[in-house]
Image (cartoon, grey):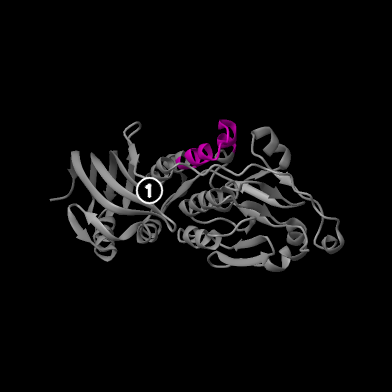
Amino acid sequence: MPRPILTYLLAVGLGLLGGHALAADFTVIPQGATTLVFVVGTIVPEDADRLSAALIGRSGVTVVMESDGGSLAGGLAMGRAIRTAGADTAVVSGQSCASACALAWLGGARRFMGPGSRVGFHAAYRLSPVLGPIESGQGNALVGYYAAQLGLPERAVAYITQAHPEEMQWLSIDDAANLGIGVLPFEGSPQTAAVAPPVRLPSSQAPVAPSAENAARAFVFELAAHWSASNAELMPFLAHAYADAVNFYGDRRNPDFILKFKRTYAERWPERSYRIRDGSLRVACQPDLTCNVDGIADWDFRSPARNARSVGAGSFGLGILLGANGPRIVSETSAVIARHVDAPP
């Protein structure tokens, strides 16, 4: 009989979680009817697809996390992948999971913290080349929407977004209980785990996966948030956002064509604020998990190098396929409603 899963975590966790990788490193360890998936290092947008692939077809999974954070969109998408798969999350004794990692950890069907483990939150932010980290209202809105999908109360949302981007709010189990964030402790230490008595885990109902409409809606908000971020954040996200063939403004295009088009536009307007207008988003999904999403977005784009600014609003329409590897755009169109451009002659 294999050792109970969290006893095993205590016995081997420090050996596997000893260092930080430049990008998240995944280790999958089958344990009979259960599976451990270790996620270590900086989270990047592509890690959500990698995690989804690691979870497909597995049951009884615990995702063990150790990271200082990384991409906001990557952390949110990983959390959704964990919740959809019905996996648990854990932070091993003495280790920490902060920022984007903590958001992903929230996605666990059951969340575990060991003695001395730390789970840290702060407000979403964007990096200004002059001012450094600046709190992002749209990023915090994405976090709030994600937390609502997980069933967390408003007081929990306020808690996980209240710390300044350069500070950290470390969650305790007592705080979690007061905030309505379900967290289960497990006892023991790496030195005593090999002879520790079995850890009995409480039973829980299988989580309800977010609806197709909610998944499509969340993806569109993430897309908008990336258009408000730097090009270094935007382009890797777009590289995984499109299907192999896309109806792009009435023409059939491949992702290479679309990415070249988007990169040119993003480089022309490197500083961007892009916000979906409140109440404008409409989502309709078909049985094949293709969702049509339309809405109105307001933008404020700037190019300091050209001393130029574009402010306006436009309607947009997206076709989104919710596949095993995550949402992919299969059609795209838009139309300008109003635009004002200030540019040098």
> Where does label 1 land, which residue?
289
Horizontal and vertical percent position of residue 270: 31, 54
Q: Is residue 217 left or right of residue 179?
A: left
Compared with 309, 194 (above or below) is below
Image quadrant assignment for residue 188: bottom right
Residue 312 visible from this viewpoint = no
Q: In the displayed image of the protein, which residue is found farthest to the front?
A: 287
Nearer to the camera, 39 or 132: 39
- Verify whether residue 61 appears in magenta: no
Compared with 157, 83 (above or below) is below
Instruction: Report the residue at 31% width, 33% height from top.
Output: 280
Image quadrant where one finds the N terminus? bottom right
Nearer to the camera, 224 or 58: 58
Write down the region rendered in magenta: 142-159
Q: Is residue 212 left or right of residue 194?
A: left
Instruction: Report the residue at 49% width, 57% height from top.
Output: 48
Compared with 125, 295 (above or below) is above
Image quadrant assignment for residue 25: bottom right
Horizontal and vertical percent position of residue 293: 31, 42
Horizontal and vertical percent position of residue 128: 41, 51
